[in-house]
Image: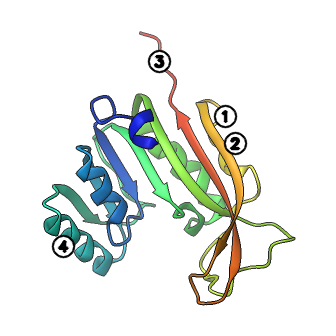
Amino acid sequence: KLLQMFPPAKYRTVLELGCGEGRDAVFFGMNRYDVTAIDNVSTGIEKGIQLAAANQIQADFLCADIRSFTSKTEYDMIYGFRVLHYIPPRERQALIQRYQEMTRSMGVHIFTVCVEKSFVPLPPDHELETYLFKSGELFEYYSNWKLLYINEDIVDCNSSGIPHQHVIDTVIAQKFEEPA
């Protein structure tokens, strides 16, 4: 569906935050996007480079912390799958604003985050260095953008071998055309 909404002919440059081992970055590359993928874990970056090479995909993998990454490039799309909840709440607004500034006019952000809900217990594999979002918090950071899609879901998971659930907020937001 993302390919239909944001075809690579129109949304050429993609920055993936927290790319892990590169699966999503390679997917974008296989679909003719120019991809820059960052993660602060070097072993993940190395696996991403290997995965891209095995699939004959050109992508730039960089070992960098999303909290300090800067670029002079304006991206058409900035994407992050369950990565922003590693950012302490006091740093989120400034971080998201910096990435908004790195987005071209009419560019998009696509993010999913884990959300805290009192009626959904923390998963057994919950990491202590995560900072769950409050319900709707992610959407508020895009109050001055066009919200193309917002959603909150409870999803079943078995990542730890123990069935559990996560609450996930998703936003797809587009930067307004700035007047000439």
Give the Cα separation between the discs numbered 3 and 1: 15 Å
The C terminus sits in image quarter: top left
Please name the amino acid that badge 1 sits on: Ser
Residue under pointer 1: 143
Going by the numbered disc 4, the residue's amino acid type is: Gln
Residue 6 position, x and y percent, is 40, 35
* Residue ID at (70%, 80%): 164
Q: Going by the image, does 99 lie left or right of 59? A: right
Q: Please determine whether, in this image, residue 30 is positioned above or below residue 148.
A: below
Provide residue 144's location: percent of width, then percent of height: 62, 30
Q: CA distance from mark 2 to mark 3?
A: 20 Å
Q: Which label sits on residue 50?
A: 4
Which is more foreground, mark 4 or mark 2? 4
Please tell me which of labels 4 and 2 falls first in the chain: 4
| Mark nearer the viewer, 3 or 4 | 4
On screen, residue 7 above or below 38: above
